[in-house]
Every structure is written in C-alpha cells, then in structure tokens.
Amino acid sequence: MQAGRLRHLISIWTTPGFTDERIHLFVADGLIEGQHRREADEFMDVHPTPWSDVMTLISKGEISDGKTLAALLYLRCVTQVGRPGR
C-alpha cells in the first residue's frame, strides 16, 4: 500500500522502568494499492473497517495489542477533541 499522507500521532515508551525503548506511532491516509517491495516472509492484509466496528473489536478484546490500541484510541481521541497544543 502507498500512503497519500503519513502523519505522526504520538511517541510512547514501550516498557517504562524496564527499558528506554520508545516507539513512534503513525497513521497513513489516502491508501492506494501499489507495487510492494516486501521480503519473501513479509505480508500485509488490509481490512477496511468502519470506526464503529473498530470500537466494538476493542471492547470485545479482539484488538489487544498495546501499540495498536494506543494508536487507535489516540487517533479516536484526537479526532473527537482535536490535537493537543494545536
């Protein structure tokens, strides 16, 4: 997939008090299918999903990865109340 726009959402500490690892979460808008340059063991499945379904998947515990939850819920909050400091 190719993104029309890539936006930084937030940077988070993965395990404060244990490691100084920090990751940066982004959202890609305007996705279009393009030529991939993946390695043989890399894959990507794209599933367009309405926000209401995403929130249901979160509430059912079907989306449980911490990084994914942080990105989705941060994006949802920013969408509803605006980006802090802007």
Image (cartoon, rainbow, N blue to C red):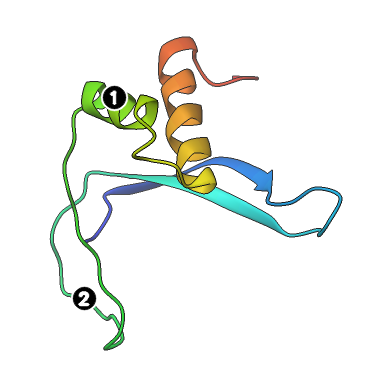
Label 2 and label 1: CA atoms lie apart by: 31 Å
Q: Residue 86's x, y, as percent?
A: 59, 19
> 21 or 31: nearer the eye?
21
Q: Is residue 70 above or below residue 51?
A: below
Image quarter (top left, top right, bottom left or bottom right) of the N terminus = bottom left
Can you tell which quarter of the image residue 30 is in?
A: top left
What secondary structure is marked by label 2?
loop
Q: Say whether residue 51 is left or right of residue 76.
A: left
Q: Amino acid at mark 2?
A: His
Other-residue count near label 1 (Cα within 10 Å), few / some / many at <14 / 14–19 / ≥20: few
- Check the image and report above or below for 33 versus 86: below
Residue 24 screen position, x and y as percent: 59, 51
Dot placed on the residue nearer the N-terminal end, 2 or 1? 2
The label on residue 39 is none
Q: Residue furthest right?
A: 17
Q: Is residue 32 above or below residue 60?
A: below
Q: Amino acid at mark 1?
A: Thr
The residue at which mark 1 appears reads as 56
Which residue is drawn at the image coordinates 51% and 29% (left, top)?
74
Q: Report which residue position mark 2 lands on.
A: 36
Using the image as rendered, state which of residue 15 and residue 71 is in the foreground.
15
